[in-house]
Amino acid sequence: MQPKLRNRTDAILRAFQAGQAQDLKRLGNDSIEEAAVENDSELASLSVIAYSLYKILTKDHFLKSRVWPRLSQGIGNSLKKCLEAALKQNEAMYTKNLNNVISEIKEIDDELGHFAKNIYEKAKVKQASTAYALGLSLSQAASLTGADRKELQMYIGTTRIHDEQHATKPIHERVERLRELLNT
């Protein structure tokens, strides 16, 4: 099990428990950048989870629901189990608990998604579009995150990704900086 997955899982867990939505968004964006460079589907999955949790934490109707404490506790417990599995180098248990987090995100969407639907699927498309903007082909970006290729193509067509300014630092420098931050 890669130390970066353990560190990233830990950072996502801490940000979620603290209710730090913007940190989750940043972790999601940093993760998809690194996943795109390294073609790392596990890191891409963490990116989608972090971005989904960011979206959830920014929706008041989720946080004010009477079932939110139970649902958020379930996500927190699954993330803790992911972290424990990563520390024990148990890849199968890590994957199982990561899938539990995804299921719990979808459960939130089913139970509370009156104004926001398909949060997890939309997060896959959003993170895939970021990977596309970083230089991956449409197919590579969709494959990396598990996003529906047609949905991704429609999303990219309605955004202004092609007009975005390029980053001032090359991605390898940003990834190296991220590694330094996670190892401190």
Image (cartoon, rainbow, N blue to C red):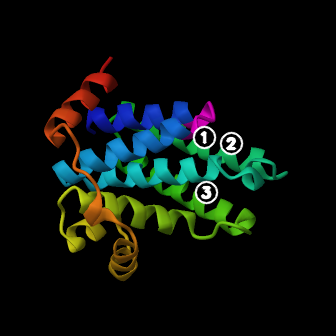
Relative to 57, is 80 on the left or the right?
left
Give the residue at mark 2: 73
Marked residue nearer the N-terminal end (3 or 2): 2
Q: Residue at x 49, y 68 (%)?
A: 121
Mark 1 lies on a secondary structure that is helix
Give the residue at mark 3: 104
Please state the extent of the stretch shown in magenta in the rendering.
16-21
Badge 3: residue crowd in 10 Å (few <14, some 14–19, many ≥20):
some
Relative to 178, is 99 on the left or the right?
right
| Snapshot quadrant of residue 76 | top right
- Measuring from the top left, give residue 139's x and y in whole percent: 22, 74
Report if residue 10 is visible in the image: yes
- Measuring from the top left, give residue 168's x and y in whole percent: 20, 39
Marked residue nearer the N-terminal end (3 or 1): 1
- Give the vertical position of 96 relative to 87 (above or below): below
Q: Do the residues labelled 2 and 1 touch (CB within 8 Å)?
A: yes
> In the image, what residue type sits under mark 2?
Gln
Mark 3 lies on a secondary structure that is helix
| Snapshot quadrant of residue 128 | bottom left
Q: Which of 153 and 140 is in front in this view?
A: 153
> In the image, what residue type sits under mark 3?
Glu
C-alpha separation, residue under disc 3 versus residue under disc 1 = 11 Å
> In the image, what residue type sits under mark 1?
Asn
C-alpha separation, residue under disc 2 versus residue under disc 1 = 6 Å
Mark 2 lies on a secondary structure that is helix
C-alpha separation, residue under disc 3 versus residue under disc 2 = 10 Å
Instruction: Let me know if residue 163 is in the magenta part.
Output: no
Badge 2: residue crowd in 10 Å (few <14, some 14–19, many ≥20):
few
Please tell me the numbered disc located at residue 77. Answer: 1
